[in-house]
Image (tube, helix red, strand yellow):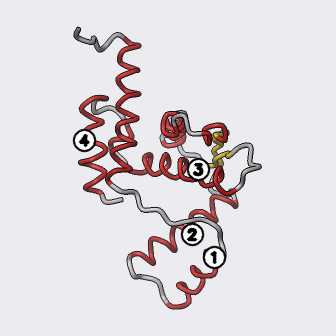
Amino acid sequence: MRLTDFEDVFAGPLEKIAGGGWEITRSPDYLCYIALATLSIRYVFETFPDATRVDFLVERSEKTTENVREFHDYLRDMLGIHESVKLIGDIAAEGKASIPLQAADTLCWYGQRAKAGLLKRRDEQRRFWMIAKRQGYPHVHTSADLRELSQHLQARAIEEKLKQGKVTIAR
């Protein structure tokens, strides 16, 4: 995802409808959570037909944990009527000592350093062995993906404003 796409295609249009107070328009981190969760659910749905649920684990932090929990609720909107929606499980928060979170941080560290061209040969070999035989698939979030997510959240924002009586529809 390019930062300009985040700002122009996702955050800008969403702010016009939802207003500037929505955290997701300030930081791509929340959008990345929604995108990762959506991709994960679809991947599990397509790859493991016997799966009944996908739960999520995030690192506990004062501000971020509650925001991610709120965005977790939007996953049903993102997946719409797709059958994979039945797999959406719970979200839990744990501290930095959690082994799965440490593993995720390590993998992200290697990925960021590799993309920046900063890995030494030994580190590149470690990165390769961590991911070489893992199932999964690469995905680059395109402008179209961001536009679709933004449109779903815009619809949700309008719905919320209608419920609160902050928007009237002209006839």
> Residue at coordinates 70% horizontally, 61% vertically from top-left?
99
How far apart marks 1 and 4 lie (CA) works out to: 37 Å
Q: Which element type, helix, strand or loop, lies under badge 2?
A: helix
Q: Earlier in the sequence, mark 3 or mark 1?
A: 3
Q: Residues within 10 Å of mark 4 (few under 14, many from 20)?
A: some
Residue 14 in picture, x, y percent from top left: 30, 36
Given the image, on which type of amino acid does mark 4 rest? Gly
How far apart marks 3 and 4 lie (CA) works out to: 27 Å
Q: Earlier in the sequence, mark 3 or mark 2?
A: 3
Q: Which element type, helix, strand or loop, lies under badge 4?
A: helix
Tell me the residue that label 4 is attached to.
12
* Residue nearer the viewer, 134 or 166: 134
Residue 137 in picture, x, y percent from top left: 55, 65
Q: Earlier in the sequence, mark 3 or mark 4?
A: 4
Given the image, on which type of amino acid does mark 1 rest? Met
As displayed, is residue 166 above or below residue 89? above
On-image quarter of the N terminus: bottom left
Q: Residues within 10 Å of mark 1 (few under 14, many from 20)?
A: few
On-image quarter of the C terminus: top left
Quarter of image, res 100: bottom right
Q: Is there a contact, CB below 8 Å, between mark 1 and mark 2?
A: yes
Q: Is there a contact, CB below 8 Å, between mark 3 and mark 2?
A: no
Quarter of image, res 85: top right
Given the image, on which type of amino acid does mark 3 rest? Arg
Q: Quick check: 98 left or right of 33?
A: right
